[in-house]
């Protein structure tokens, strides 16, 4: 494939699985010789992209269209970027940046192909704006797990979308950072945890969708059986104050540690004895789940999005119903009480995640989509010019 000019957009200013995928993919595309630019608000993604040597335009706010002045300003800026960049493919990753980019293209911002990558399991509205967006403005849709396809069922059944314009490409994890050689001893010492303490951790934003409250309720149920258990929450978010208050109300004072943002997240996750994804929504192809598996940490996850495509329940981890504190407690207790079985499952998980979720595979499959979209466009253009002749 000839080198492509590619633009990735993301509305997130903070860090998470979506921004991680954008940066991971962009760096590998650049390493393979493609020209990559990232458009985002100023924040963690733009800083890390610049540090990696990527071209960045972080002059965007990427607020919803209801913020009319900000939205129109972004559309003008995006139109200029598209005209200057003459991109072959634009890959948008969130709702706000998708609408800004789609409107900029309609306003004469460029003829490159528009691909949308859908990262979450939130509801897809079926009103006329989305029918126009998915029917006319987006050339191809990438979803990060097969479960996401069901969100588009009304649009598929109505003929707005075709299955041939949807590809499933799961997110990857960084094998250079998350592997069996990473140790969490320094983090455990930092937290003042004794050697035999049971550490149950979550790596993710502190928002309601991530389900931290259900894990805390599970911990309260487990106190009589596992009195030395400590919960560790790595991440930031608007719910931190509420979660601290709930921890106190549940009698977990001192038993929940809030670490905030950590640049040493691999070492933090390696300090976990059990990694939990207690989500009740949003997660479609969890990065933190794959990371913990790659580290060889036993995992428990809610049956949300792609959890069953990442974990084989009872073989490489445990899956429980979303929002089920008793189910979480039972899964944690079974792992804590049978460490040899948990270690065998973790070893299988490490091998499986390394095989199925590599950066190379993510990049190869994404480039195949780009090539297909560009090929369809070229074929359509050839048919049109032939008819005109």
Image: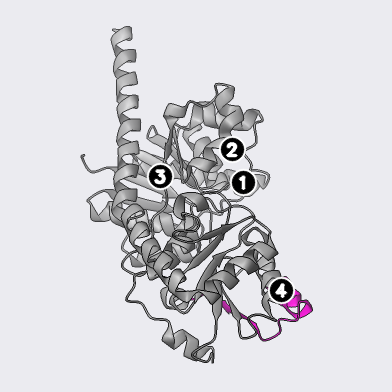
Q: Earlier in the sequence, mark 4 or mark 3?
A: 3
- Residue located beneath label 4 in the image: 221
- Indicate the position of residue 99 as horizontal and vertical percent values: 55, 40
- Residue located beneath label 1 in the image: 122
Image depth: mark 1 or mark 4 in front: 4
Q: CA distance from mark 4 to mark 3?
A: 38 Å
Q: Earlier in the sequence, mark 1 or mark 2?
A: 1
- Residue located beneath label 2 in the image: 151
Q: Quadrant of residue 160?
A: top right
Q: CA distance from mark 1 to mark 4?
A: 30 Å
Q: Circles 1 and 2: CB distance less than 8 Å?
A: yes
- Residue at horizontal 29%, vertical 45%? 364
Task: Name the residue nearer the viewer: 55 or 136.
Answer: 136
Q: Is residue 354 magenta?
A: no
Q: CA distance from mark 4 to mark 2?
A: 35 Å
Q: CA distance from mark 2 to mark 3?
A: 16 Å
Circle 3 crowding by C-alpha within 10 Å: few under 14, some 14–19, many from 20: many
Label at residue 169: 3
Q: For mark 4, give the secondary structure.
A: helix
Q: For mark 2, give the secondary structure.
A: helix
Q: Earlier in the sequence, mark 2 or mark 3?
A: 2
Circle 1 crowding by C-alpha within 10 Å: few under 14, some 14–19, many from 20: some
Q: Earlier in the sequence, mark 4 or mark 2?
A: 2
Which portion, as a residue range, is magenta? 239-263
- Indicate the position of residue 240 as horizontal and vertical percent values: 67, 72
- Residue at horizontal 59%, vertical 37%? 151
């Amino acid at each position: 494939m000839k080198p492509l000019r590619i633009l990735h957009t993301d509305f997130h200013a903070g860090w998470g699985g979506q921004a991680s995928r954008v940066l991971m993919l962009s760096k590998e595309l650049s390493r393979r010789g493609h020209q990559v630019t990232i458009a985002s608000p100023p924040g963690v993604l733009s800083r890390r992209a610049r540090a990696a040597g990527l071209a960045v335009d972080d002059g965007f706010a990427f607020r919803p269209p209801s913020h009319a002045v900000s939205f129109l300003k972004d559309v003008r800026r995006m139109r200029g970027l598209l005209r200057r960049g003459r991109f072959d493919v634009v890959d948008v990753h969130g709702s706000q940046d998708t609408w800004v980019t789609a409107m900029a293209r309609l306003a004469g911002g460029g003829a490159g192909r528009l691909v949308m990558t859908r990262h979450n399991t939130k509801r897809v509205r079926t009103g006329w704006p989305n029918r126009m967006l998915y029917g006319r403005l987006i050339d191809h849709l990438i979803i990060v797990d097969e479960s996401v396809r069901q969100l588009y069922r009304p649009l598929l059944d109505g003929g707005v979308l075709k299955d041939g314009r949807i590809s499933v490409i799961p997110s990857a994890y960084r094998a250079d950072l998350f592997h069996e050689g990473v140790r969490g001893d320094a983090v455990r010492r930092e937290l003042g945890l004794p050697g035999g303490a049971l550490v149950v951790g979550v790596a993710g934003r502190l928002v309601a969708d991530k389900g931290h409250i259900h894990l805390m309720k599970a911990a309260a149920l487990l106190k009589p059986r596992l009195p030395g258990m400590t919960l560790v929450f790595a991440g930031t978010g608007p719910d931190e104050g509420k979660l601290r208050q709930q921890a106190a109300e549940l009698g977990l004072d001192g038993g929940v540690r809030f670490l905030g943002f950590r640049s040493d997240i691999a070492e933090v996750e390696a300090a976990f004895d059990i990694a939990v994804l207690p989500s009740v929504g949003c997660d479609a192809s969890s990065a933190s789940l794959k990371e913990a598996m790659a580290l060889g940490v036993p995992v428990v996850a809610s049956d949300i999005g792609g959890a069953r495509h990442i974990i084989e329940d009872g073989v490489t981890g445990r899956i429980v119903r979303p929002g089920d504190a008793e189910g979480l407690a039972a899964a944690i207790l079974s792992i804590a009480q049978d460490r040899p079985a948990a270690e065998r499952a973790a070893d299988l998980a490490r091998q499986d995640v390394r095989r199925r979720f590599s950066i190379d595979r993510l990049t190869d499959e994404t480039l195949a989509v780009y090539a297909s979209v560009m090929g369809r466009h070229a074929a359509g253009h050839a048919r049109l010019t032939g008819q005109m002749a």
